[in-house]
Amino acid sequence: MTSLINTSGFWDNFLWPLLLAFVIGAFGLIWNFLIRKKFKITINHNQSFIGTNNGHDHAIIRVDFINKTSNPINNLRITTIPNYSFLQGISTMVGGGRFTQGGSTQIVFPAVADLTDDEIDARQPINIPAENNLEGNLVIDIQNRNNQITNIEFSYLTKRIRRQIRFNELQIRQL
């Protein structure tokens, strides 16, 4: 008891262990910050465009989900601001009709052609496995190009992430 009362006893028994615990805790926080893995969402405006098909416009937005965490991202929901509908893809009927070749008439049945590729179905929640990436196109039914999307909101758990869309910079392409 008398060794705690003098200065060297206090220094050896209380202050050094407290200082050591503080240094180890600070080092641990810095280490976790430096090696922390993240979930990242990027929108590639260079590969995004407005697609036109039969007078109807769709926004095709290229999105990359990069999950570097050790946990899966479950129930990721996507909404647009203002609120437009997502589509699984865009398809159209091509071909069909009759043609005559060598004196006989042939019937050609129409076929469905998919006009977009690498679609992400945002009509339902999306699950991204741990340490995995998901890249693809969000197909948004905007009806005409005057209906602009300002933001896309991604939400999972209690987090909401908004990404701004530079809608005026998107190219217009015929699908």
Image: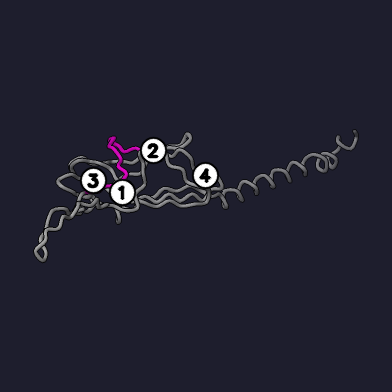
Please report the bounds of the magenta region as a residue range. 79-92
Furthest-bottom residue in this view = 102
- Name the one closer to the observer, 49 or 112: 112
Residue 48 percent location from the top left of the image: 29, 52
**Mark 3 or mark 4: which comes first in sequence?**
3
Residue annotated with mark 1: 61
**Mark 4 or mark 1: which comes first in sequence?**
1
Residue 41 percent location from the top left of the image: 41, 48
The mark total stands at 4
Furthest-front residue in this view = 103
How is colour applied across the structure in the image?
one colour
Q: Amino acid at mark 4?
A: Pro
Residue annotated with mark 2: 124
- Name the one closer to the observer, 93 or 171: 93
Distance (Cα) linking label 4 and label 1 = 23 Å
Looking at the image, residue 156 lies above or below residue 98? above
Looking at the image, is mark 2 or mark 3 nearer the viewer? 2
